[in-house]
Image (spheres, helix red, strand yellow):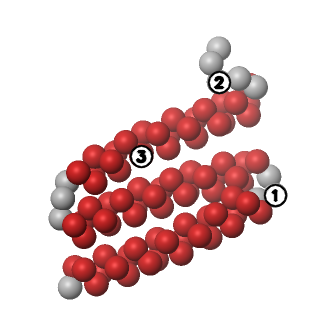
């Protein structure tokens, strides 16, 4: 039963990631592309968590935490670069 639910979740998150890739390529503005990239990171985190549930191991949850940290820092760096023109002052 849990295998079927994980498979359905993997398909749904994968479709969402493909739609985010479309928005990343066709975004009319830089801010739309940054938001699409952040949403793509969230989809990747969701995929990793579902795979961790499916394989019944906690290693994937640590990978998800690392993805959260990298995704947050990259979004902050992109926004800071757009506002000020540099990341490190």
- The reply to whether the C-beta atoms of the residues labelled 3 and 1 are less than 8 Å apart is no
Disc 3 to disc 1, C-alpha distance: 27 Å
- Where's the C terminus, which quadrant? top right
Q: Which mark is residue 87?
A: 2
Q: Which mark is residue 67?
A: 3
Disc 1 to disc 2, C-alpha distance: 24 Å
| Horizontal arrangement in the rendering, residue 10 relative to residue 80 (left or right) | left
**Residue located 50% across and 44% down the image:** 71
Q: Residues within 10 Å of mark 3 (few under 14, many from 20)?
A: some
| Horizontal arrangement in the rendering, residue 16 relative to residue 11 (left or right) | right
Residue toward you, 14 or 72: 14
Residue 8: x and y in percent read 37, 81
Residue 66: x and y in percent read 37, 42
Q: Earlier in the sequence, mark 1 or mark 2?
A: 1
Q: Earlier in the sequence, mark 2 or mark 3?
A: 3
Q: Mark 1 highlights which residue?
A: 28
- Circle 3 or circle 1, nearest the eye: 3
Residue 87: x and y in percent read 65, 24
User: Compared to 8, does 37 lie above or below?
Assistant: above
Q: Earlier in the sequence, mark 3 or mark 1?
A: 1
């Amino acid at each position: 039963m849990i295998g079927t639910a994980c498979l359905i979740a993997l398909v749904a998150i994968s479709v969402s990631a493909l739609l985010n890739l479309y928005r990343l390529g066709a975004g009319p503005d830089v801010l739309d592309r940054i938001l699409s990239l952040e949403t793509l990171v969230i989809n990747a985190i969701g995929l990793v968590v579902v795979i961790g549930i499916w394989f019944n191991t906690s290693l994937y949850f640590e990978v998800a935490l690392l993805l959260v940290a990298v995704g947050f820092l990259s979004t902050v760096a992109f926004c800071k670069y757009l506002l000020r023109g540099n990341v490190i002052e």
